Amino acid sequence: MEKARGRPWQNQVCARAKKMVEKDFTGTGFEFTLPVQIILIEKNMEKGKTIAGFRLHERDTGSADVQVALLTERINHLTEHLQKNVKDHSSRRGLLVMVGQRRRLLDYLHHADLTRYQTVTKRLKLRH
């Protein structure tokens, strides 16, 4: 057996998470919460798909197009959260910061390359 590196409980958590995912709980009425590591993996996969859809070249992860797409994804997620949790004012402030950042990136795109701006706003269904 391999010696656990880092935190000793990490390997146990990964093993339990794999077992939980492999089992089929349909129709049993059994509810469980996924471990944080699996949720993070799913988020990274979604983020990778978004980057792949908006990148300008193979290694592009930081162009304005990609940043706008990632911010839009986060804004949509946070908007759903705030509809359920109306009194979460700190998240509301974070949402406003993200909206402002996206607006600045869109303004830059509008001035730098109008066709890219129009493509991004159309694909993300943003008003312009």
Image (tube, rainbow, N blue to C red):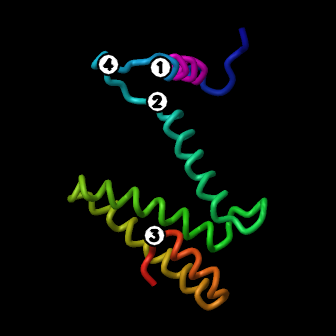
Give the percent coordinates (x, y) of residue 11: 60, 20
Is 52 above or below relative to 41?
below
- Residue 35's disc is 2
* Residue that badge 1 annotates: 20
Q: Nearer the viewer, mark 2 or mark 1?
A: 1
How far, Cα to Cα, is label 2 from label 1? 9 Å
| Image point (48%, 60%), residue name | 73
Q: Amino acid at mark 2?
A: Pro
Disc 2 crowd, CA 10 A, few/some/many (<14, 14-19, 20+)? some
Q: Earlier in the sequence, mark 2 or mark 3?
A: 2
Image quadrant assignment for residue 108: bottom right
Q: Give the foreground label among 1 and 3.
A: 1
**Residues at marks 2 and 3, CA–CA distance in whole angstroms:** 27 Å
CA–CA distance between discs 1 and 3?
Answer: 35 Å
Residue linked to disc 4: 27
Q: Amino acid at mark 1?
A: Met
Which disc number belongs to residue 103? none
- Magenta segment: 10-20
> Upstream in the sequence, badge 1 or badge 4?
1
In the rendered image, which residue does mark 3 sit on?
Answer: 98
Query: Is label 2 in contact with label 1 (beta carbons under 8 Å)?
Result: yes
- Residue 9 location, quadrant: top right
Secondary structure at numbered mark 3: helix
Mark 1 or 4, which is nearer the eye? 4
Q: Give yes or no for residue 19 being in the magenta stretch.
A: yes
Q: Earlier in the sequence, mark 3 or mark 4?
A: 4
